[in-house]
Image (spheres, grey):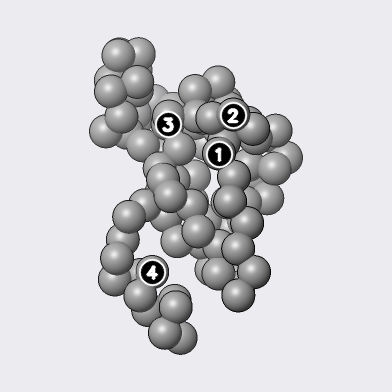
């Protein structure tokens, strides 16, 4: 299995790269609304568009849920052990 590791705090995404990584996945699935960084912004999550969320993630990578793992065509978001195990077994 080919593994590529990327520290996106040091090697930040461009907008095109981020959108490519996310693919068809809803932006809200990848945005970390629970992040202290987001809470400190005092923004209303319901008032933000997908483009707003992408802009915020580009500005502050802590707002991207981690880890992001792409296996085949599937993007696994967050530390979901069940999803990772199923993807590795499958």
- Evaluate if marks 2 and 4 touch, with contact meaning CB atoms under 8 Å apart: no
Comparing marks 4 and 1, which lies closer to the viewer?
A: 1
Where in the figure is residue 50, as x and y percent of width and height? 52, 36
Where in the figure is residue 85, as x and y percent of width and height? 35, 75
Where in the figure is residue 10, as x and y percent of width and height? 59, 29
Q: Which mark is residue 63?
A: 3
**Distance between mark 4 and mark 1 Cα atoms:** 19 Å
Residue at left offset 60%, top offset 75%:
1
Residue at left offset 49%, top offset 23%:
60
- Evaluate if marks 1 and 2 touch, with contact meaning CB atoms under 8 Å apart: yes
* Residue 81 as seen in the image, left or right of residue 49: left
Q: Which mark is residue 10?
A: 2
Comparing marks 3 and 2, which lies closer to the viewer?
A: 2
Where in the figure is residue 52, as x and y percent of width and height? 53, 26
Mark 2 Cα-neighbour bin, 10 Å: few <14, some 14–19, many ≥20: few
Q: Which numbered disc, 3 or 1, marks the residue that appears first in the sequence?
A: 1
* Residue 38 as seen in the image, left or right of residue 76: left
**Distance between mark 3 and mark 4 Cα atoms:** 21 Å
Comparing marks 3 and 4, which lies closer to the viewer?
A: 4
Q: Which mark is residue 84?
A: 4
- Location of residue 62 by image quarter: top left
């Amino acid at each position: 299995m080919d593994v590529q590791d990327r520290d996106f705090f040091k090697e930040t995404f461009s907008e095109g790269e981020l959108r490519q990584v996310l693919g068809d996945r809803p932006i809200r699935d990848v945005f970390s609304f629970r992040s202290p960084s987001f809470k400190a912004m005092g923004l209303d999550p319901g008032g933000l568009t997908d483009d707003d969320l992408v802009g915020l993630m580009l500005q502050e990578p802590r707002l991207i849920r981690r880890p992001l793992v792409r296996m085949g065509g599937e993007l696994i978001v967050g530390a979901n052990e069940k999803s990772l195990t199923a993807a590795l077994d499958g």
